[in-house]
Amino acid sequence: MMRKIYIPYIIFALIILLIPVFIHSYYYLGVLIQAGYFSLICMGLSLVMGYAGQISLGHAAFFGLGGYASAILTGGHGWCPWLAMIVAMIISGVLAWLIGKPSLKLKGHYLAMATLGFGEIVYIFFNAEIRLTGGPSGYTMGVIPYLTIGNLTIDNEFKHYLLTWAIVLLILLVNLHIIHSRLGRALRAIHADEEAARAMGVHTARFKVWIFVLSAVYASLAGSLYAHNILFVAPGPFAAMHSILFVTMVIVGGMGSIWGAVAGALLLTILPETLRGFQDYNILIYGGILLFIMLFMSGGLFGGGRLFLAWLSHLRGRKKEVADG
Amino acid sequence: MLKVQNIRAGYGNLLVLKNASIHINEGEIVTLIGPNGCGKSTLLKTIVRLLPLQHGSIIFQGKEINHLPPEKTVSLGIALVPEGRHIFAPLSVMDNLLLGAYTCFNKLTFQEDLERMFVLFPRLKERRKQLAGTLSGGEQQMLAIARALMSRPRLLLLDEPSMGLAPLIVENIFETINKLRAEGKTTICLVEQNAEMALEISDRGYVLETGKIVYQGPRENLIENVEVIRAYLG
């Protein structure tokens, strides 16, 4: 069982680490760094959507909370970036708990509504609290420092790429372990049949809340990394539109598949960039590709991939039958 | 062992159980019979606390469990085999059994219990790596019972174990219930549409109608009166 998890993981990690050997362009690396942040967010969101069966429309807000908290604490108050990052994650986690606790007790999509409202509130807060956040023109009250590890300052795209993806790989490993542990089994049981899971003594409401909190913490972590990379935060990237983009990434990748979350984030970050060459037609092609995935791979990239494999083995089986018969 | 007194329960504003009292003694098999929608399943779900209790009390082994959540009642030793089986279809048979032991997981006892289940249900051993959703109806029912037994219950609540199964398989399942009683570790409360068959193996029975107990007594009385009851219940 464990081997089945680790082999694809190691292959993926090697590919990720080898990319900067072949790609030196800071622009391409920048796109991949962005995909790394989105992967972090989507990995958490995928647990919420695929396992707790709930949709969050406020993950851009947690992304923003991470970014702003890091910016304000380091730029404004001179905190150590790593400490600020942890404090940001705690703030996001506590807020997620406060939203999740009442809304996840109820059946139906109350979390979607609560997070949609929360996202708007946070977005308005970023825009309106000018003394704290700098308002619509972004945070300019202090200088956000680069991250440092010992004497190494993470100050170029190459270093940012390695740091971001090292963290993505770490979280990926954590998530793969969660899914294949007793906790993951309980989560899958909730997804399969919530009432039966309760009858087995699985505390379903509590699990859902904690998964939601975990996903908010991941999004906050991505936000902090983002702030220390761009060295500037403004409300723009944390608007509700981005929350919807994250949900789309998870669905395109395949809900409930951790690999799918990463694949969806990579695809939907890289695709618009590669389609730039088509100029006016890029949105058309982008929409067409999304439509194709949704129509013909209804389980998302990874769900679809599995279907494709099943189809292949089915064909092989048929050929064998013909040969035997 | 279990004493349910004057309970009232239902779904939201819909009151299903109006005033029901039953008791179950250690080592017994007790059957609840009655027409569709009379509140049998509601009663079982209320006992494991999947449904809120609006009035009355439930006492299990001398302890009031009115306010306990399901995860506590499971660890106290009450297990439910839900109506319609409700196995975890996308999970393997093994995972289903592991989830059955969710509240009391311990490697040593788990192995022991697993062996015991494979003796009771040899088919599950053959199919332990298969996804539960690919099992036949009878096998799924066996899995649902085995899953409930993995939590080492002292009281097993079986909701319609014969539903939708071929007569031969139903017999098989009733044999298993008998075996469980012979082991002497589990007390059983059975809800059945198949009244004759259920009464055959039970010690006592209750007849429910529209949320109330309308008749109760030892097996012999119920069997004698089964025709009467049927006429009465329509």
Image (tube, coloured by chain):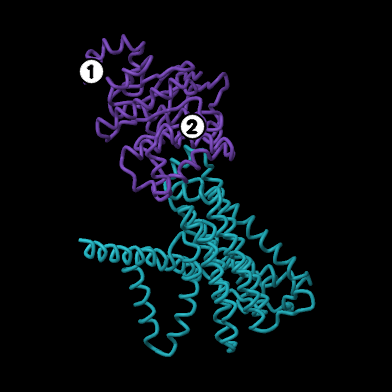
Chain colours: A cyan, B purple
Q: Which mark is residue B230?
A: 1
Percent x, y of residue B210: 32, 23
For the residue pair A251 and B141, the one nearer the viewer reads as B141
What percent of the width, then of the height, locates residue B144?
40, 37
Which sits in the foreground, A270 or B102?
A: B102
Q: Which residue is mark 2?
A: B49
At 26% from the left and 10% from the top, the residue drawn is B224
Residue B166: numbered disc: none
When asked about the image quadrant of residue A83, the answer is bottom right
Q: Residues within 10 Å of mark 2 (few under 14, many from 20)?
A: many
From the viewer's side, name the closer residue of B184 and A233.
B184
Most extreme residue toward the front, as rendered? Answer: A324
Q: Say which amino acid is labelled 1.
A: Arg
Quote the CA–CA distance across marks 2 and 1: 30 Å
Chain letter of mark 2 equals B
Pointers 2 and 1 in contact (C-beta within 8 Å): no
Label 2: which secondary element: loop
Identify the residue at image location x=56%, y=87%: A23
Q: Is residue A194 above or below residue A123?
A: above
Q: Neighbour class for label 1 at 10 Å: few (<14), some, many (≥20)?
A: few
Instruction: Judge from the rendering whether residue A68 lies leftward or rightward of residue B187; answer left or right.
Output: right
Q: Give the structural element (helix, strand or loop) at label 1.
A: helix
